[in-house]
């Protein structure tokens, strides 16, 4: 399998030199440092205060993006609750290598938005297909005609009409708010894209405040906490607009009817911060856990960008701090260290220690700054997993492990997912009940498990 994936270089390199690995690791450790974050925040606030500027939150809206529609439903509430000004930008989808499987991403996002919306008190219809192109262009023509205030006023209603396929309502909204021609739309989107690029991001549904990005409603609790720390919350005794739901560890426990397939990679910071909690969820709910590792994306031929890589590691550090998970003392493992550890996986499975091996590797790479590109580093991984180094040493570099990872990758794609961490919940007959992508969906998975155990097949 490995020969099918060539070295892509740049941000997508799968085999960095020792110097490149060291530099990247040093950069990522600094990037994810809480101390560095607090310094930057203090500097941003000092600059704002010196200029006498208002607190400004910028929002980037992509019409076809389901997460943008969820975000539009909280736009009015933000300035009502917090003393901030909202500037709205219209953007297109993620550019180039920042979304190597864009069609899959868009389809998965529509399914995911339908699942999470009611949990957040929002609305998104069951809509696996893309909205009609003509309606998307119509929606853009209305939004491109708006100033920031009226954009906030109408974005939610436009989204509801778009996703309902209701052209009549869009026409009513166009009469009420106005619309512009396609050339003006292109100019407005080009301006939004340029601003997003200047700020070093690539997605829609993004909020930006004073140097930091917040992805949609899933990261709004971080933004709300930051605004509250600055004394901008007008109702500080009230619950957050959008809180992160808690993982439900029980109380119901399965008796052999459910299987959780967990798809991790050894280089994903998001896997690193959710790994132990995934194992805990399976243990506390009695669900049978099956570990199905896949190669990191850049090691299986998918390109990425520096902006995307920076954001992912930085965002993972923020999520880790919120969950009190050790993270941020990093030594990058892409390439040979990942291959070496996978070459030990079958052996660890024979001894019933595969979960420990995987977890030990993640801990060494993302929390202990251990160089797993050396024998000394790999020995620490092996021994932390409760395995014998002498036996491991003669097995490192063994071939044959690629076939298992390729089988797992294909299973992941069949579920409509390409990234990790990902989860598939199966019933006793091996039928898929739900598939979810992302460390920020473990809470949803836990709710699905509890509902299934409580209600059987009528759980949705």
Image (cartoon, rainbow, N blue to C red):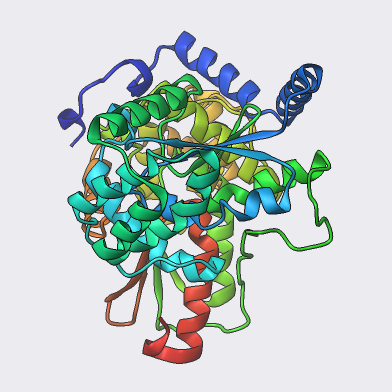
Quadrant in the picture for the N terminus: top left
Residue appearing at x 43%, y 49% in the figure? 68
Q: Position of residue 459 (x, y in %)?
A: 42, 84
Residue 107 quadrant: bottom left
Task: Name, please, the residue furthest toward the left.
Answer: 4
Front-most of residues 416 and 298: 416
Q: Is residue 204 above or below residue 190?
A: below
Residue 364 visible to the viewer: no
Front-most of residues 459 and 221: 221
Residue appearing at x 31%, y 58% in the figure? 170
Front-most of residues 377 and 3: 3
Quadrant in the picture for the C terminus: bottom left
Residue 328 visible to the viewer: yes
Q: Is residue 19 above or below residue 383?
A: above
Q: Is residue 107 above or below residue 451?
A: above
- Horizontally, residue 211 falls left or right of residue 136, namely right
Residue appearing at x 23%, y 56% in the figure? 130
């Amino acid at each position: 399998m490995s020969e099918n994936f060539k070295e892509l270089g740049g941000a997508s390199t799968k085999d960095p030199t020792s110097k490149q690995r060291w530099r990247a690791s040093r950069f990522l450790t600094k990037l994810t440092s809480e101390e560095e974050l607090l310094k930057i925040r203090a500097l941003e606030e000092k600059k704002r205060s010196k200029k006498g500027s208002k607190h400004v939150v910028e929002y980037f809206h992509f019409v076809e993006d389901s997460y943008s529609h969820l975000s539009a439903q909280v736009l009015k509430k933000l300035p009502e609750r917090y003393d901030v000004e909202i500037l709205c930008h219209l953007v297109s989808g993620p550019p180039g290598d920042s979304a190597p499987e864009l069609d899959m991403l868009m389809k998965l996002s529509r399914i995911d938005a339908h699942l999470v919306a009611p949990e957040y008190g929002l609305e998104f219809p069951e809509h696996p297909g893309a909205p009609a192109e003509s309606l998307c262009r119509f929606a853009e023509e209305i939004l491109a005609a708006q100033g920031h205030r009226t954009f906030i006023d109408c974005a939610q209603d436009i989204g509801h009409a778009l996703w309902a396929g209701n052209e009549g309502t869009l026409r009513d909204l166009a009469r009420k708010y106005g619309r512009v021609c396609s050339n003006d739309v292109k100019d407005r989107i080009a301006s939004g894209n340029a601003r997003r690029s200047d700020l070093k991001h690539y997605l829609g549904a993004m909020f930006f405040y004073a140097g930091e990005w917040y992805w949609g409603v899933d990261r709004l609790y971080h933004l709300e906490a930051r605004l509250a720390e600055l004394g901008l919350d007008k109702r500080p005794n009230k619950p957050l607009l959008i809180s992160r739901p808690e993982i439900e560890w029980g109380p119901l426990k399965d008796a052999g009817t459910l299987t959780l397939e967990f798809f991790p990679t050894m280089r994903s910071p998001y896997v690193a911060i959710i790994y132990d909690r995934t194992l805990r969820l399976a243990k506390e709910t009695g669900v049978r856990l099956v570990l199905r590792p896949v190669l990191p994306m850049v090691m299986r031929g998918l390109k990425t960008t520096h902006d995307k890589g920076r954001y992912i590691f930085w965002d993972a550090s923020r999520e880790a701090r919120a969950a009190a998970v050790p993270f941020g003392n990093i030594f990058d493992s892409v390439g040979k260290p990942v291959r070496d550890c996978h070459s030990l996986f079958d052996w660890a499975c024979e001894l019933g220690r595969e979960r420990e091996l995987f977890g030990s590797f993640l801990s060494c790479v993302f929390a202990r700054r251990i160089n797993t590109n050396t024998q000394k580093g790999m020995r620490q991984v092996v021994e932390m997993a409760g395995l014998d180094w002498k036996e491991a040493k003669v097995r490192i570099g063994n071939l044959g492990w690629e076939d298992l990872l390729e089988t797992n990758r294909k299973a992941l794609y069949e579920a409509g997912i390409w990234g990790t961490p990902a989860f598939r919940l199966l019933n006793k007959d091996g039928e898929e009940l739900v598939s979810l992508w992302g460390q920020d969906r473990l809470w949803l998975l836990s709710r699905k498990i509890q509902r299934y155990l409580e209600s059987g097949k009528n759980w949705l």
